[in-house]
Amino acid sequence: MKIKDIFLPILIIFLVLSCSKTITTKSEERLISSLFSPYIDDMGKAVDIIQKHELIANLTHLMNMDNGGHKYYLLEYEHISEMIGNVTQQLYEDILVVNNSYTILYSMKNIDLYGRRLSQLSPILHYFISNLPYDDVAIYKPFEYPPLSGNYSFCI
């Protein structure tokens, strides 16, 4: 009988503690945000350039011209790289601009990726991107540019 008297309070305490959530301290949050903030700020600047110059719509249009638009794309590639390079610190391996049909429109480091489907490059990456929630840290919510145009794009 004494074992039951001891076991029951211990079991209740264990259940209560197992249901409580862990508390994240402010110092942990600061460390995590300080680690990722340069990347997030840098990508925010790149997204501003992509939105301002309507790169997704323009590059999709170029791709549809001239059997893939390679002739016109080469003229724009250096200009786009310069615009994005001027506002970012390039803390990452590459930047890919992909349209809503998951066709690669721009790669800062590899011009040969232009016009390829993301699933050809990496089926795992294609699956990952197509199933991401928009409120993920690395995804900028869909934006409409120009306003009231009905053209929505998002950047990762």
Image (cartoon, rainbow, N blue to C red):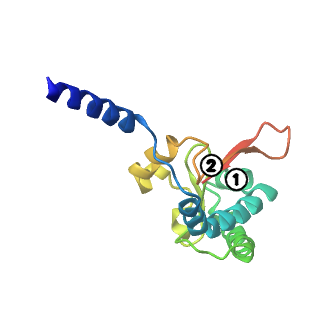
Q: Residue reaching furthest top?
A: 1
Q: Residues within 10 Å of mark 2 (few under 14, many from 20)?
A: many
Residue at coordinates 64% horizontally, 63% vertically from top-left? 40
The correct choice, above or below, for 72 with respect to 117 in the image is: below
Q: Is residue 76 left or right of residue 118?
A: right
Q: Say which element carries label 2.
A: loop
* Chain-order first, disc 1 or disc 2: 1
Label 1–label 2 contact, CB within 8 A: yes
Residue type at mark 1 is Ile
Residue tagged 1: 56
| Residue nearer the viewer, 125 or 60 | 125
Q: Nearer the viewer, residue 12 or 120?
A: 12
Give the x, y percent position of residue 123.
Answer: 40, 49
| Residue at image mark 2 | 99
Picture residue at 16% right of the left edge, 27% below the top: 2
Percent position of residue 107, x then y: 58, 65
Residues under labels 1 and 2: Cα distance?
6 Å
Kindly state the secondary structure of the residue where label 1 is placed. helix
